[in-house]
Amino acid sequence: MNFNFTEEQLMSQESARDFAQNEIAPSAVERDIKAEFPTEIVKKLGKLGFMGMMVSPEYGGAGMDTISYVLAMIEISKVDASVGVIMSVNNSLVCWGLEEYGSEALKQKYLIPLAKGEKLGAFALSEPEAGSDATQQHTTADKDRDFFIINGIKNWTTCGTTADFYLVIATTDKSKGYKGISTLLVEKGIQGFAHGKKEDKLGIRSSDTCSLTFENCKVPKENLLWEEGKGFNFAMNTLNGGRIGIAAQAIGIAEASFDAAVKYSKDRKAFGNPISNLQAIQFKLSDMAVKVDCAKLLTLKAAALKDADKPYYKEAAMAKLYSSKIAVECALEAIQVHGGYGYVREYLVERYLRDAKITEIYEGTSEIQKMVIARALLDGK
Ligand code: COS
């Protein structure tokens, strides 16, 4: 692992930072209050290459490495974690999944507009009865000559109402258990496919989360990714990279919390001096800084392994487990430093806490990350 970032990695970090400060920050508070999707921001992110960062230029992407992606994700999420999750899902779940496992025809038709940010993607794995135990796919995709007929319900789909293309995981052969699960690409607007209402969430409110319903939805057999029976492996492999993205999102929130705590502690006076002079506050700031740095190192390590084509699933789980935990802790401590002001909307830290919590839940709960890590350790990996 190289501790010196390349020119390209630094450029990606800097342009994400500029974009976040200039284009995302001004509307972040209002969009959170109104739970309003950042349509124009996502379009602009696409034009700048942030929606298909790791996709090869041959397929319309920016051809960057995972480290650049992590650095950019941190900067964007530091300002607005809702934009962070939209970017993460499109990059690490949808684009990566399609580039890795899609046929050439699927890549030409769907990956190129997704990577260019002209279209938006969603990843539909979770169901009312399939969350942590993702093998329990009740959604079915039955083969009927040249088509798959999809029936079922998906839950918690990020960009569920706004996406154009959906990667849908469904059971194609129930008798085979998880080896009878497959992945299909579904286009918005096809008959029998509908989305539910946008969920009213605690945090990441301006991102768009909803359920999806499929009623005899006819999808051409060419829309199958990888091969029949590989859908569970597809989901697991894709989520490994997704967890690096969510770890970076969590670090962004933690860093924003830290910065806010530092600023407030220098501005706020108590007992005749800025509260940053108080050891009680200094200890909080030190603890936060150490945690943020540890989370960054873990996440960059997972990214570096991925870029080097080495196994990274254990490291990705460690990065997500730790980064999400410290995002919640740092947001809580930032509120504590702010006292009563931390509890009201005027200061941003209450949003950081609301946004941080989801990082311990989606793309595998913290308990699932611990299972993944423990199994890898016991297997000697
Ligand atoms: N990376 C790659 N492959 C993985 C994997 C991982 N992290 N975890 C499991 N697999 C593979 C196994 O190698 C096995 O493949 P083969 O049959 O080809 O050998 C297959 O998946 C089944 O593995 P296992 O028997 O361990 O599966 P379990 O049912 O015990 O589930 C967990 C494993 C719990 C780790 C998995 O279900 C999981 O990650 N759940 C969380 C899902 C999730 O993140 N949901 C949120 C979605 S938000 S979009």
Image: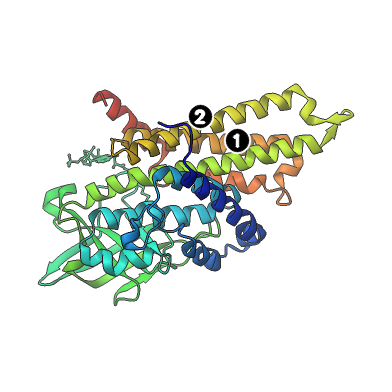
Question: In what element is the residue under mark 2?
Answer: helix
**Label 1 sits on residue:** 330
Quadrant holding the C terminus: top left
- From the Cβ of disc 1, is ligand 1 less than 8 Å away? no
Q: Is residue 202 visible?
A: no
Question: In what element is the residue under mark 1?
Answer: helix
| Amino acid type, mark 2 | Cys
Percent from the top left, x then y, of residue 278? 78, 24
If the picture is divided into quarters, which one holds ligand 1?
A: top left
Vertical relation: 180 (above or below) 372: below
Q: Residues within 10 Å of mark 1 (few under 14, many from 20)?
A: many
**Label 2 sits on residue:** 294
Residue ID at (42%, 69%): 118
Q: Is tag 2's residue or tag 1's residue first in the polypeptide sequence?
A: 2
Q: Quadrant of residue 330?
A: top right
Residue ID at (28%, 35%): 311
Residue placed furthest toward the right: 272
Vertical relation: 233 (above or below) 105: above
Q: Mark 2 near mark 1, Cβ–Cβ under 8 Å?
A: no
Left or right: 17 as drawn, with respect to 131:
right
Q: Residues within 10 Å of mark 2 (few under 14, many from 20)?
A: some
| Amino acid type, mark 1 | Cys
Percent from the top left, x then y, of residue 130? 31, 50
Vertical relation: 105 (above or below) 328: below
Q: Which label sits in the foreground, 2 or 1?
A: 2
Count of all numbered marks drawn on residues in the image: 2
Residue ID at (36%, 33%): 315
Quadrant holding the N terminus: top left
Q: Quadrant of residue 123?
A: bottom left
